Image (cartoon, rainbow, N blue to C red):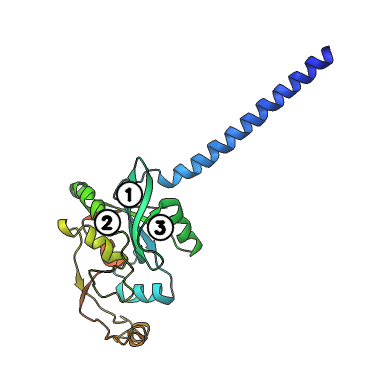
Amino acid sequence: MNGSIFMKTILKNRFRINLLFFFSILFFVLSCKNSQTLGLKNGDLLFVTAKESGLSGAINNVTQKQKNASFDHIGILQKDKTGVFVLHAAPKGGSQKQNLNEFLKDQVNDGQKVVVYRLKPQFQKNIPDAIEKANSMVGKPYNFNYILDDNSYYCSDYIERAFRKDKIFTLEPMTFIDPKTGKTNMFWEEFYAKKNLKVPEGELGCNPNGLAGSDKIERIKEL
């Protein structure tokens, strides 16, 4: 009888230990997940750092304005009771609403980092309308020509449009000149030649580095 009680006690203790271990793991997983969204606010702008080569490098080569800002992609955060999402326009998937964790995973897989910027307090009131506008553009295809088109959008174009009503960002004449040579960057010459298009030098547009330089937003942190 004493042996039976002893075994029951061991089994109970083992069950409690396993249960405690399970909840410890669950707490750890949830903590890691929550750490991604800790401090993030609805309407935050997520800038993705540029690579040194390919399309990313070519974009940065002709658009970088600040030494500490080197970006090739941007999205806007939508944080509500249903979850945390990133509204953005990307080559894969076009204009979309993507789960934040999936968005961050994609950047990690590409070896890129995400830097959070936020509208300054006096412009926070414009966020609801911008998110509504961004959602209305979800489903549109990606603009692979990087020439303004109302039927397709590229990343910074998508964000500029979302805030256009409140003039948070501005369109500027685009340049494809390599600052080191003073001539059109070879990547862009070949890029548009393959499409039988003229390099849109001087045409209105925008880019992630230009948006990052806006005096209406401020850098918050790197995720």
Disc 2, SS: helix
* Marks 1/2: CA–CA distance: 10 Å
Q: Which residue is mark 2?
A: 134
Q: Position of residue 99 (x, y in %)?
A: 41, 52
Q: Which tag, 2 or 3, sits closer to the chain's start?
A: 3
Could you tell me which residue is drawn at 78 percent across and 15 percent down? 5
Q: Which residue is mark 1?
A: 78
Disc number at residue 204?
none
Could you tell me which residue is drawn at 26 percent across and 75 percent down? 147
Residue 94 lies in quadrant: bottom left
Could you tell me which residue is drawn at 48 percent across and 59 percent down? 108
Q: Position of residue 113 (x, y in %)?
A: 43, 60
Residue closer to the observer: 134 or 30: 134
Q: Amino acid at mark 2?
A: Ala
Side of 81 relative to 5 (left or right): left
Q: Which tag, 1 or 3, sits closer to the chain's start?
A: 1
Disc number at residue 114?
3
Q: Position of residue 104 (x, y in %)?
A: 44, 55
Classify the position of the N terminus by image quarter: top right
Q: Amino acid at mark 3?
A: Val
**Is 13 drawn above or below residue 111 in the view shown?**
above
Q: In this view of the protein, can residue 50 be seen by the observer?
A: yes
Q: Amino acid at mark 1?
A: Gln
Residue 199 lies in quadrant: bottom left
Tell me whether the residue at label 1 lies in contact with that at label 2, contact meaning CB atoms closer than 8 angstroms.
yes
* Marks 2/3: CA–CA distance: 20 Å
Disc 3, SS: strand
Tell me whether the residue at label 1 lies in contact with that at label 3, contact meaning CB atoms closer than 8 angstroms.
no
